[in-house]
C-alpha cells in the first residue's frame, strides 16, 4: 500500500471491481453522472458509521475525488473524518462487504462499520 501524498479518499482494486458490478446491476454503469457518495453518520456501536450510496447530484459543499477510476464524493463534514481513508472490499469468510481503512479512527468495532475519533 502506498503512502498518501495528498488529502483524498482512496479506492482499492477489489472495491473498484465491486463498485463497477453494482453500477452495472443498477443499470447506470455507462452514465458518467453517477458516482459513489461516502458519508459519515452518527450511530453504530462506536458512535459513527459509514454510509455508501450511488448519487448523481453534486451539492455545493461536496468534496470530489477520483481514485483508481472511481469517482468518490463526500460532504465537507464527513470528509473531516475520512481524510486519507481507503475504501476496500472483502469477500472472505470473515465477512463480505465494503470496509474502510481509516487512519483517523481511534477505535473501530468488530463489524468494521462503526468507528470513533
Image (spheres, grey):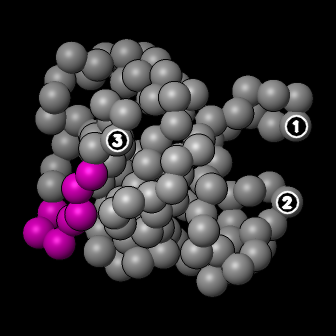
Residue at image position (64%, 48%) is: 99
In this rendering, position of residue 43 left or right of residue 54 = right
Say whether residue 31 is magenta.
Answer: no
- Identify the image quadrant of residue 78: bottom left
For the residues marked 2 and 3, what is the alpha-carbon distance in whole angstroms?
A: 27 Å
Residue at image position (88%, 37%) is: 94
The percent coordinates of residue 75 (x first, y second) are 30, 68
User: Residue 110 — which label?
Assistant: 2
Q: On the rendered image, what quadrant is the N terminus found in?
A: top right
Does label 1 or label 2 sit earlier along the sequence? Answer: 1
The percent coordinates of residue 20 (x first, y second) are 41, 22
Q: Is residue 89 visible?
A: yes
The percent coordinates of residue 108 (x first, y second) are 76, 69
Give the magenta range.
59-65
Does label 1 or label 3 sit earlier along the sequence? Answer: 3
Image position of 42 with respect to 50: above or below = below
Say whether residue 61 is magenta.
Answer: yes
Residue at image position (73%, 27%) is: 91
For the residues marked 1 and 3, what is the alpha-carbon distance in whole angstroms?
A: 26 Å
Considering the numbered disc 3 on the image, is that residue within a helix, a strand or a loop?
A: strand
Q: Nearer the viewer, mark 1 or mark 3?
A: 3
User: Residue 67 — which label?
Assistant: 3
Considering the numbered disc 1 on the image, is that residue within a helix, a strand or a loop?
A: loop
Mark 1 — residue? Answer: 94
For the residues marked 1 and 2, what is the alpha-carbon distance in whole angstroms?
A: 11 Å
Amino acid at each position: 500500500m502506498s503512502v498518501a501524498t495528498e488529502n483524498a479518499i482512496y479506492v482499492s482494486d477489489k472495491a473498484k471491481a465491486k463498485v463497477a458490478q453494482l453500477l452495472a446491476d443498477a443499470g447506470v454503469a455507462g452514465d458518467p453522472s453517477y458516482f459513489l457518495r461516502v458519508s459519515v453518520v452518527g450511530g453504530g456501536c462506536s458512535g459513527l458509521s459509514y454510509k455508501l450510496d450511488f448519487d448523481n447530484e453534486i451539492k455545493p459543499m461536496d468534496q470530489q475525488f477520483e481514485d483508481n477510476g472511481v469517482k468518490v464524493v463526500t460532504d465537507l463534514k464527513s470528509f473531516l473524518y475520512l481524510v486519507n481513508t481507503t475504501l476496500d472490499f472483502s469477500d472472505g469468510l470473515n465477512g463480505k462487504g465494503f470496509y474502510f481503512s481509516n487512519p483517523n479512527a481511534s477505535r473501530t468495532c468488530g463489524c468494521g462499520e462503526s468507528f470513533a475519533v
